Image: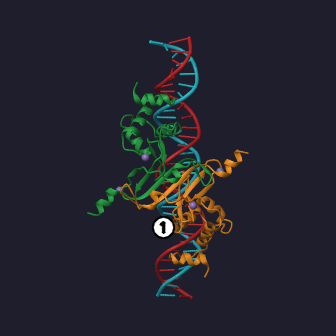
Chain colours: A green, B orange, C cyan, D red
Amino acid sequence: MEKRVEILKKHNIRITPQRLGVYEILLDKNKHLTAEAIYRKIRVSFPTISLATVYSILELYYKKHLLNEIRIDFDKSCFDIRTDTHHHFLCKQCAEIYDIDLHPCSALNNKEVDGHLIHELQGYFYGICSKCKDKSNL
Amino acid sequence: MEKRVEILKKHNIRITPQRLGVYEILLDKNKHLTAEAIYRKIRVSFPTISLATVYSILELYYKKHLLNEIRIDFDKSCFDIRTDTHHHFLCKQCAEIYDIDLHPCSALNNKEVDGHLIHELQGYFYGICSKCKDKSNL
DNA sequence: CTTTTAAATAATAATGATTATTGCTTATTT
DNA sequence: AAATAAGCAATAATCATTATTATTTAAAAG
Ligand SMILES: [Mn+2]
Ligand SMILES: [Mn+2]
Ligand SMILES: [Zn+2]
Ligand SMILES: [Zn+2]
């Protein structure tokens, strides 16, 4: 059986072309896509798909822990197929989002901070990415 | 001169009763208030103030670095009079937001990660707070 | 392979936080 | 006391996300 289908079935998710399409885009294309961006991409193969359907599929995948939702940009969510704990960097100049894999941080190792039980965490960094930095220092 | 007035003038901010009121609420009341919550509080002393004015004042203070905007709740921003770098914890049960002061973390000390220049960062933790934890383990 | 049925989709409307607009009001300057 | 520039209230607009509903489809049963 195809790998995508296998993974979705393992999570008790009904297979539909739309769901396979969204999953493929999340896997194949650049990471950290907005719902709108996914919608634009999937419309190439499914011209009648609705944006609401994209949102509904993303919500399903999120609940099944098949993806991560990040809100590094206050205005809109981005969706990430990586589900392991990692951080993100948003370049203020080019708006690119980078994965940041930090070395063991005191807060990451513990399941608690100040007596509060941690279920998940998000680290968001903002600044100028290396590419943009290089461009300005010619 | 009054302390609030002094601080605002130091940042070249014109003094108005509305601005003083918002500033006072941010200082005095519990931290991490939404624009709506600030609006509700300030309407006690300024019944004719507009929500748009509250937003405009908050934007001004943000640009002058007099407050921090956090988006730990995806749906709405909260405003924090603390402007030093610190993290936040959101309790999934009672929705309370706590300040988290972490010990030196590798990412915090450096001004760079993976070659990217960091201007600012936000750390968001999600889980069950100590109070709610105690309540459930009676 | 057909029928059945519960779930998924497309189309569309609604929601809600935030931002933009505009005419009036207030604070500072002259 | 004017003049001028900025702030405010009221209101409309924007835009991402969610809700609704009738139609279609995937999976299960026969
Ligand atoms: Mn990522
Ligand atoms: Mn805080
Ligand atoms: Zn960049
Ligand atoms: Zn709690």
Q: Position of residue B75 (x, y in %)?
A: 55, 51
> As drawn, is A93 to the left or to the right of D6?
left
- Quadrant into which the C terminus of chain B falls: top right
Q: Quadrant of residue C4?
A: top right
Q: Position of residue B98 (x, y in %)?
A: 60, 57
Residue placed at 34% from the left, 57% from the top?
A130
- Quadrant into which the N terminus of chain B falls: bottom right
- Label 1: chain? B
Give the farthest residue toward the left: A138
Element class at badge 1: helix
Residue identified by numbered label 1:
B63
Looking at this view, is D22 or A7 the one in front?
A: A7
> As drawn, is B25 to the left or to the right of C19?
right
Image position of B103 with respect to B24: above or below: above
Q: Position of residue A44 (x, y in %)?
A: 36, 37
Badge 1 crowding class, 10 Å Cα cut-off, few under 14, some 14 to 19, many 20 or more, is few
Q: Position of residue B41 (x, y in %)?
A: 66, 63
